[in-house]
Image (spheres, rainbow, N blue to C red):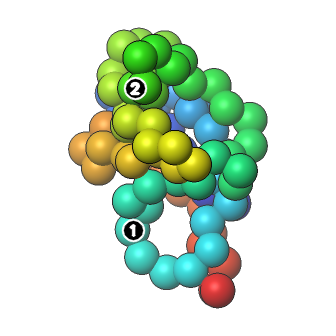
Amino acid sequence: MLTIKCAKCKQKLFKYHKIGIGRVLHCWKNKIKNDNTIRKDGAVFCTCGNRIGIEMGNYIKMDQSAFIYSGTKQKG
């Protein structure tokens, strides 16, 4: 499980079940747990107003400079 946080205010945005190695480029909606984001007009925001990503159907395309994460990735 990864804990995804806002890069601006360090607030927890959601927990994400990442499988495989590599960067977090997008997050599948069905693997997101404890979602604390605000969604408006297809964009995903932190409560501080920082845009985290854009909704693209079944996943969220993440903005690499808008978030940080910690935790462990599971091998696929």
Callout 2 amino acid: Ala
In the rendered view, tell whether residue 17 sits above or below residue 62: below
The residue located at (63%, 25%) in the rendering is: 36
SS of the residue at dot 2?
Answer: strand
Q: Nearer the viewer, residue 48 or 32?
A: 32
In the rendered view, tell whether residue 4 sits above or below residue 26: above
Callout 1 amino acid: Arg
The residue located at (34%, 26%) in the rendering is: 51
The residue located at (64%, 86%) in the rendering is: 76
Q: Quadrant of the N terminus?
A: bottom right
Residue 31 at x, y percent in the picture: 70, 54
**Residue assigned mark 2:** 43
How many residues crowd mark 1 within 10 Å: few (<14), some (14–19), many (20+)?
A: few
Q: Nearer the viewer, residue 15 or 54?
A: 54
Residue 23 at x, y percent in the picture: 39, 68
Is residue 67 visible in the rendered structure shown here?
no
In the rendered view, tell whether residue 22 sits above or below residue 39: below
Q: Nearer the viewer, residue 17 or 30?
A: 30
Is 36 on the left-hand or right-hand side of 46? right
Q: Nearer the viewer, mark 1 or mark 2?
A: 2
- Gap between marks 1 and 2, in whole Å? 20 Å
Dividing the picture into quadrants, the one containing residue 48 is: top left
Is 63 on the left-hand or right-hand side of 9? left
Residue 11 at x, y percent in the picture: 52, 27
**Residue assigned mark 1:** 23
Is 66 on the left-hand or right-hand side of 40? left
